[in-house]
Image (cartoon, helix red, strand yellow):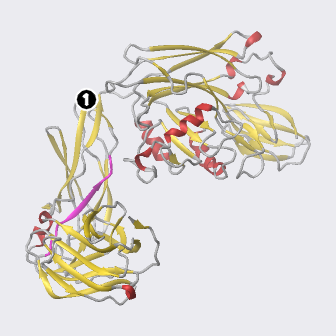
Amino acid sequence: MKKQILLACLFIATFAMNARAEGEAATDSIFLGNCQGRGVSLSESNVNGGALFFPQSRMEAYKGNYVESIYIYMYYPSMVSNLQVFLSESLSEPYGSSFNAQVSRTGWNKIKLDTPYLIDGGDLYIGFTMEGSPVSFAIRQFEGQEYLLENGEWQPYGNDTYSIAMYGVVRGETLPLYDAAWDCRTPFGYALAGEPIPIEGTVTNKGLATIHSLTFSYKYGNNTSTETISGLDIAYLESMNVQLQGPSFNESGNYELTVELAAINDNPDLSMDDNTSASFPIQCFNEMGQRNVLLEVFTTELCPNCPAAHRVIDPLTDGNERIIRMEHHAGFYTDPYTIEASVAYEWFYGSMLHAPAYMVDRTNRHERFPGIYNYGTSGPVSSVGNVTEVLDDAFRTPAFASVNIEATNDGESNYRQITIHASGYGLQPLPEGRDNRLYIYLTEDSIFTENQSGATGDYCHRHVVRQCVTSIWGDPIDLDTGYEKTYSVLIPEGWDMRRMEAVAFVGNYNENDRNDCEIYNSASIKLSSLIPASSNSQYKADGGIFMQGKALAVPDDCTHINIYTPDGILMHSEDTNGQPIPLHHLPQGIYLYAATMHQTTVTGKIIL
């Protein structure tokens, strides 16, 4: 409905400050609006006015004071005509009190009322109408009902980011001292009986007294508890992020938790309409089993931004045995490593396809991390940003099922013909009607390429999805009675079994809801143990170190490597963490290496 047009930086008007005694008002006026800062956006041309609504529950605290002036942000003041500001108990004309006004500057314009408007404690609308110019919006600081005059009709305006760029200035002898807004971040949805569940949120001081202490109330079922934090220093209109120990649940079960800001400096809040959180579902357990976390990355050789994203992801995942990583070559066109299942999983985006992107346990955590899941609730796929917070959240989530995976073969004669056996059972109660599925994949790590867009020199693809062993959308299993599945797979000759894994995971599948396909747990097993030492010359006992194009491939347990010339000159030294080492910067020739694996050193020769 409105255009997102960035405007030049302009300063917001500030209020006069008068020093007062401790505990009294810090200013002689108070802000009545929802925005902060400068105007950053403009409406469409068919919008000719805006209004802020303040309900009786809020305005009772302002009774007896008066609105002295109104500030409006204008980007095109020369275009404005027939500007009228009003204060009224409704949006029906005639408005309770209206004034003709003029604006003269780009930015915030102060409109001093001819007659101050006495606040009677009832519903209050502060608004304006005009012709010739679009309405300006600014960054939203407080929640509140707002309206736009669109095609001659007042229509509700709701936007989490922007607010109509206007506010009133209230003066008087009884201005509210204790008034704050509480914006509670969605807490972690699982708890352990007897253990507190941390609560985090932002408090904004809307009263004139500096906040030194806050008391919060936790309500769940028939239970209520409180927590007080002290030593604060939150001045008028300032915000602070607060972290609370939070409540604890004595018994397992499902709870609905609300968090209320109950008192400020041991005084009741004068306006409670912005003090109570939404109702958050919390599932409490007597015990929670540790899960492995499934990280699925979308990437292709045509993606120029993917190498940079992998430099972020690799250090977070390499060496962490609780992260099961799979990379789908999809999301940004396709390449030689794309398989049918990876393309099918583009369904999880729910919005514009792109790479690099990722999903963790196929779970949409938008409520917990709205800034990370930038496509909202459309799907569990997110751009590669702050992956750490999402992974930490997943680590703390209980395992709802066990996953055991084994891989065997017939020995030297046909070692590439492998048998995969997966089994497990439910660990925690799940809602009825779930369509639980088992998924098994084969992945291959460190595949050398010279064709990666955005890479300088050689590049190795990580944890590439090679084959979907089960059906693309998994095979049905029963977690109540337990499951056992066996699959036979032939590994193609071109795939390096030393760097392959079989990956198994279980979760729900809902073909009608991409946000209802959460993974319960996952596991993986390396296939290198199935390779007989004498089966093939390329698998001689080299410690898993060999040239792959112009990169030196090293096993996962290799932590450091030194590369020397034959006469002992050190040419390269690097901590590897199992990652391939590009060597295109070294001249052609014969080199020796010394690789650290566990507490042993493996040596050998390579040729560039």
Q: Is residue 411 above or below residue 17?
A: above
Return the x and y of residue 504 as percentages of the image width and height. Answer: 54, 24
Dot 1: what SS?
Answer: loop
Q: Position of residue 151 (x, y in %)?
A: 30, 70
Q: Amino acid at mark 1?
A: Ser
Q: Which residue is mark 1?
A: 252
x and y percentages locating residue 252 in the rendered image: 25, 29
Q: Compared to 291, does 385 lie above or below? A: below
Q: Residue at x 46, y 52 (%)?
A: 374
Task: Using the rendered image of the protein, determine whether residue 66 is visible from the camera's viewpoint.
Answer: no
Quadrant in which the C terminus appears = top right
The answer to whether residue 462 is seen in the rendering is: yes
Residue bounds of the magenta highlight: 175-186
Residue closer to the observer: 508 or 350: 350
Q: Is residue 578 above or below residue 33?
A: above
**Residue drawn at 46 percent across, 76 percent down:** 7
**Mark 1 nearby-residue class (10 Å; few <14, some 14–19, many ≥20):** some
The number of discs equals 1
Q: Nearer the viewer, residue 395 or 231?
A: 395
> Magenta stretch containing residue 552, yes or no?
no
Q: Going by the picture, which residue comes out furthest to the front?
A: 151
- Horizontally, residue 200 falls left or right of residue 55, namely right
**Dividing the picture into quarters, in which one does residue 251 lie?**
top left
Residue drawn 17% across and 72% down? 23
